[in-house]
Image (spheres, rainbow, N blue to C red):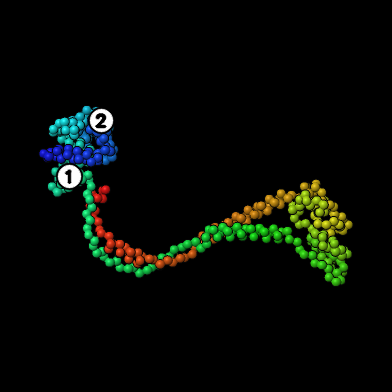
């Protein structure tokens, strides 16, 4: 071992201890804390090449030992007594094993690595330890940076949504509202009754209402009856019986036999068989042959389907994109960078300053 290696390691330990660099691994100079420090160093930066140091210190064959952490854990505090006395300077010289273990604890080069270093490298290591492993940066005066050539502006193509999400949602709501309103109006809309012209003294049943007609102009097989303006205006067939409610009683008449029931807006003879007379609507007939809940449920299902369809359309529209071309402003940015480089001094950082 080099004659001064032990003194150099001990001096390095003292300097690092005084600088507070060993607080995380060695909080005190006792045998128990030295053992704990060995465990911490082993867990944080153990390297297979450290096996030689540990095997020499604990007097164990490194080939047979495959877990030095267990060896450290099972060791006794008295195993570190000689090293503890050495770092407290209660003894003079100590064994190579103690010095190697101390160098391993503080991260100092081993004695063989130390022998391979040049004098300049040794001085640099000692100087770094003396400075607390900190090397101040060297400031160099301002220099003329290379002139950055301006780059020609170029266009970058990006794709953005054609319509905003906000507008799509509002449009879908408006479309659903307008569509629902028009459907409700169309469903309940009644045809305008054509008033009789001169010479039209008769009328016939045209599916769901009466139509005025002249005698002899009706189609073959069509029954005509004398014109009655009140019946012409008010007599209509209700095509959606499920829209009837309890409020319809007294305002609606019906013709029915078993399950064949038809409902009309005025009393009188049954249009397709004037020998039969329409009967006023009763609660029994209303409950048995109509269902307003069925009508509302059907319209609710239609509304949900319409909402789903419009939502799909809105989702498809939201995926539409438009091409946007933007000019690159790198030329202006290069000019600004060049101005900053001219004003600011360059700082050369050494290995020590990077470690900070």
Taking the image as shown, residue 321 lies to the left or right of residue 116, namely: right
Res. 258 visible in picture: no
Residue 49 picture location, percent across and down? 22, 40
Please state which of residues 310 and 332 is positioned toward the viewer in this rendering. Answer: 332
The secondary element bearing badge 1 is classed as helix
Which quadrant of the structure image shows residue 181? Answer: bottom right
Rendered view: 345 above or below 39? below
On the image, numbered disc 1 is attached to which residue? 126
Taking the image as shown, residue 285 lies to the left or right of residue 342, namely: right
Which of the two discs, 2 and 1, labels the residue nearer the N terminus?
A: 2
User: How dense is the environment of label 1, judged by Cα within 10 Å: few (below 14), some, or many (20 and up)?
Assistant: some
Rendered view: 219 above or below 243? below
On the image, numbered disc 2 is attached to which residue? 32
User: How dense is the environment of label 2, judged by Cα within 10 Å: few (below 14), some, or many (20 and up)?
Assistant: some
Q: What residue do we see at 71% from left, 59% from top?
A: 187
Q: Quadrant of the N terminus?
A: top left
Q: What residue do we see at 62% from left, 58% from top?
A: 176
Taking the image as shown, residue 187 lies to the left or right of residue 346, namely: right
Q: What residue do we see at 13% from left, 32% from top?
A: 92
- Farthest residue to the bottom: give it: 198
The secondary element bearing badge 2 is classed as helix
Q: What residue do we see at 71% from left, 49% from top?
A: 293
**Residue 199 badge:** none
Which quadrant of the structure image shows residue 152? Answer: bottom left
Rendered view: 193 above or below 46? below
């Amino acid at each position: 071992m080099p004659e001064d290696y032990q003194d150099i390691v001990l001096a390095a330990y003292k300097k690092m201890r005084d600088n507070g660099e060993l607080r995380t691994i060695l909080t005190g100079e006792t045998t128990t804390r030295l053992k704990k420090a060995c465990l911490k160093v082993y867990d944080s930066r153990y390297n297979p090449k450290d096996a030689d140091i540990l095997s020499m210190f604990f007097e164990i064959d490194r080939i047979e030992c495959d877990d030095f952490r267990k060896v450290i854990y099972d060791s006794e505090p008295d195993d570190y007594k000689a090293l503890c006395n050495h770092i407290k300077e209660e003894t003079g010289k100590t064994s190579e094993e103690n010095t190697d273990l101390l160098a391993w604890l503080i991260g100092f080069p081993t004695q063989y690595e130390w022998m391979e270093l040049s004098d300049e490298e040794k001085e640099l290591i000692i100087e770094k330890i003396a400075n607390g492993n900190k090397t101040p940066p060297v400031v160099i005066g301002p220099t003329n940076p290379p002139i950055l050539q301006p780059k020609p502006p170029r266009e970058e193509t990006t794709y953005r949504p054609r319509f905003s999400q906000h507008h799509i949602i509002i449009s879908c709501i408006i479309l659903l509202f307008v569509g629902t309103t028009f459907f409700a109006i169309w469903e309940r809309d009644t045809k305008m009754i054509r008033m009789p012209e001169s010479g039209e003294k008769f009328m016939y049943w045209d599916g769901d209402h009466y139509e005025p007609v002249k005698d002899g102009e009706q189609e073959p097989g069509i029954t005509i009856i004398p014109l009655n303006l009140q019946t012409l205006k008010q007599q209509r067939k209700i095509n959606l019986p499920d829209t009837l409610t309890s409020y319809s009683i007294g305002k609606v008449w019906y013709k029915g036999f078993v399950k064949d029931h038809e409902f009309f807006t005025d009393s009188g003879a049954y249009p397709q068989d004037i020998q039969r007379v329409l009967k006023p609507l009763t609660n029994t007939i209303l409950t048995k042959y109509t269902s307003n809940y069925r009508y509302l449920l059907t319209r609710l299902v239609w509304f949900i389907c319409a909402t789903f369809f419009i939502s799909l359309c809105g989702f498809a529209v939201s995926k539409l994109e438009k091409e946007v071309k933007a000019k690159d402003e790198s030329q202006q940015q290069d000019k600004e960078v060049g101005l900053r480089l001219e004003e600011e001094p360059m700082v050369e950082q050494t290995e020590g300053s990077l470690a900070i």
